[in-house]
Image (cartoon, rainbow, N blue to C red):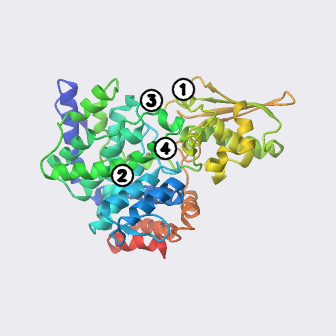
């Protein structure tokens, strides 16, 4: 969609209203046949990756306790709680339970041009509503793409909320509402009401909370699922926000220094942001991945350095944003996931791809604890533009006085170095095989039907049930 054919607005507020209307008209009118097959195939991979991430967290103590509370309220409902056996709950309870788990293990996908995780913020509600309301698979996949495209464009329009507001809070309700509005096939005005209502319901969660280990950060996607559904309920009754209201929220209240209103419609129909997302190989904040990969490359060449006994000091040269993740005494598993010192110490001890690097036991691992104080962060100059904006150079100073350095310009799995399909499918299988052994084959089946233009042959409810066969 070209912005050059539309009249130039006279103010920021007019610009936001103009582009919001264009965005909602596009989203409400989009058909699955409008989406190129490569983008649909990537969307299916993103969906499977996020389902696997949810399943991987099902037995974390806090998640399990909340799931048990939800199941005690009533089981046998139409929507699947993604854990062992796939118990059925009500639409909202399933969305809440899966939303709490969606980012718990930091294994969900993301979008790095501006920090946002539209899949994790929208898919718990899409999955639950798709089952509970018996939506077709075409409708579910369309909603998956629409929520991603809307969520990324909101984040690109107001990128300056970082690093004060965490994107899981800033965009949780908007992403969820976009997915639900697509499922309900809202007309443009109702779609606009839903998004403007949801924008007023966002969770202004501090960006510092995951670094400090405040576990409430993991609940913001679940809150967004409830709020997104509520915003859509309100929109159906004619209750919405102001057409330019997102500017009031994200710039005037949440402090983005500028509104880039044109980003709300940039590339609609030609640029598919769902195809620009990244997949994680390590269960940690993405800003640590390049450093972990660089260190692992050193350890592959010098296996005698495993354990870290010969390491006197380790310095990670990284971006200005990554410098925030310098908590050397994490108190919770969330803090560990957002601690580059912990990630590097755990990589030295266990290897970068060891799942237990960020489990509760890692917090009291004496070898990791001894190494964390030896790890320092320093700012790397001359950072390149996206998608090379999260590099890392690792410098090891050894006890014998020698030094080893390794640069990683972009982590594997990022848009600069995207993963092939098979490694992502392997990750899905690894994360889900003990609790939902059919998920891998279900994702493969979905991609095959999309590639052949035969999605109508798949039943969404049956597809979800196949995870547990």
- Sequence-wise, which precedes: disc 3 or disc 2? 2
Residue ID for mark 2: 122
- Sequence-wise, which precedes: disc 2 or disc 4? 2
- Sequence-wise, which precedes: disc 1 or disc 2? 2
Give the spatial CA distance, label 1 vs label 2. 29 Å
Residue 359 or residue 305, whichever sits in front: 359
The crowding category of the residue bearing disc 3, from other C-alpha atoms within 10 Å (few below 14, some 14 to 19, many at least 20), is: some
Residue ID for mark 1: 320
* Circles 1 and 2 in contact, beta carbons < 8 Å: no
Q: Is residue 118 left or right of residue 174?
A: right
The crowding category of the residue bearing disc 2, from other C-alpha atoms within 10 Å (few below 14, some 14 to 19, many at least 20), is: many
Q: Quadrant of residue 156?
A: top left
Q: Can you tell which mark lies on residue 361? A: none
| Furthest-bottom residue in this view | 469
Give the spatial CA distance, label 4 vs label 3. 18 Å
* Circles 4 and 3 in contact, beta carbons < 8 Å: no
Helix, strand or loop at label 1? It is: loop
Helix, strand or loop at label 2? It is: helix
- Sequence-wise, which precedes: disc 1 or disc 4? 4
Q: Is any atom of residue 177 visible in this view?
A: no
Q: Is any atom of residue 378 visible in this view?
A: yes
Give the spatial CA distance, label 3 vs label 2. 22 Å
Helix, strand or loop at label 4? It is: helix
Give above or below for 82 relative to 299.
below
Q: Is residue 137 left or right of residue 396?
A: left
Residue ID for mark 3: 163
The quarter of the image holding the N terminus is: top left
């Amino acid at each position: 969609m070209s912005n050059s054919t539309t009249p130039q607005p006279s103010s920021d507020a007019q610009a936001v209203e103009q582009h919001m209307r264009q965005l909602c008209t596009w989203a409400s009118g989009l058909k699955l046949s409008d989406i190129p097959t490569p983008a649909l195939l990537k969307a299916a991979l993103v969906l499977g990756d996020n389902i696997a991430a949810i399943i991987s967290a099902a037995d974390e103590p806090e998640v399990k306790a909340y799931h048990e509370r939800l199941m005690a309220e009533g089981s046998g409902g139409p929507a699947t709680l993604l854990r062992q056996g796939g118990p059925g709950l009500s639409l909202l309870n399933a969305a809440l339970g899966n939303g709490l788990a969606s980012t718990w293990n930091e294994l969900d996908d993301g979008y790095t041009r501006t920090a946002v995780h539209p899949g994790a913020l929208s898919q718990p509600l899409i999955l639950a509503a798709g089952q509970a309301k018996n939506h077709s698979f075409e409708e579910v996949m369309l909603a998956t793409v629409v929520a991603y495209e809307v969520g990324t464009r909101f984040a690109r329009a107001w990128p300056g909320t970082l690093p004060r507001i965490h994107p899981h809070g800033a965009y949780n309700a908007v992403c969820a509402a976009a997915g639900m509005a697509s499922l309900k096939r809202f007309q443009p005005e109702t779609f606009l009401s839903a998004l403007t209502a949801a924008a007023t319901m966002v969770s202004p969660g501090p960006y510092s909370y995951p670094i400090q280990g405040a576990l409430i950060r993991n609940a913001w996607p679940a809150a967004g699922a409830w709020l997104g559904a509520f915003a859509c309920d309100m929109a159906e009754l004619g209750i919405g926000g102001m057409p330019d209201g997102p500017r009031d929220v994200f710039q005037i209240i949440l402090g983005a220094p500028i509104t880039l209103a044109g980003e709300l419609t940039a590339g609609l129909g030609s640029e598919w942001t769902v195809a620009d997302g990244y997949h994680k190989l390590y269960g940690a904040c993405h800003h640590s991945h390049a450093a972990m990969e660089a260190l692992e490359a050193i350890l592959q060449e010098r296996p005698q350095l495993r354990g870290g006994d010969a390491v006197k000091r380790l310095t990670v040269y990284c971006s200005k944003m990554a410098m925030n993740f310098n908590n050397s005494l994490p108190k919770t598993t969330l803090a560990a996931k957002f601690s580059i010192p912990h990630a590097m110490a755990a990589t030295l001890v266990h290897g970068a791809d060891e799942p237990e690097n960020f489990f509760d036991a890692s917090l009291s691992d004496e070898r990791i604890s001894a190494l964390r104080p030896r790890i320092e962060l320093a700012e790397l100059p001359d950072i390149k533009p996206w998608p090379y904006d999260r590099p890392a150079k690792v410098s090891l100073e050894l006890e014998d006085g020698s030094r080893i350095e390794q640069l990683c310009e972009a982590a594997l799995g990022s848009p600069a170095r995207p993963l092939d399909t098979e490694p992502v499918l392997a990750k899905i299988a690894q994360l889900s095989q003990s609790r939902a052994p059919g998920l891998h084959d279900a994702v493969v089946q979905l991609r095959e039907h999309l590639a052949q233009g035969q999605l109508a042959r798949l039943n969404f409810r049956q597809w979800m049930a196949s995870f547990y066969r």
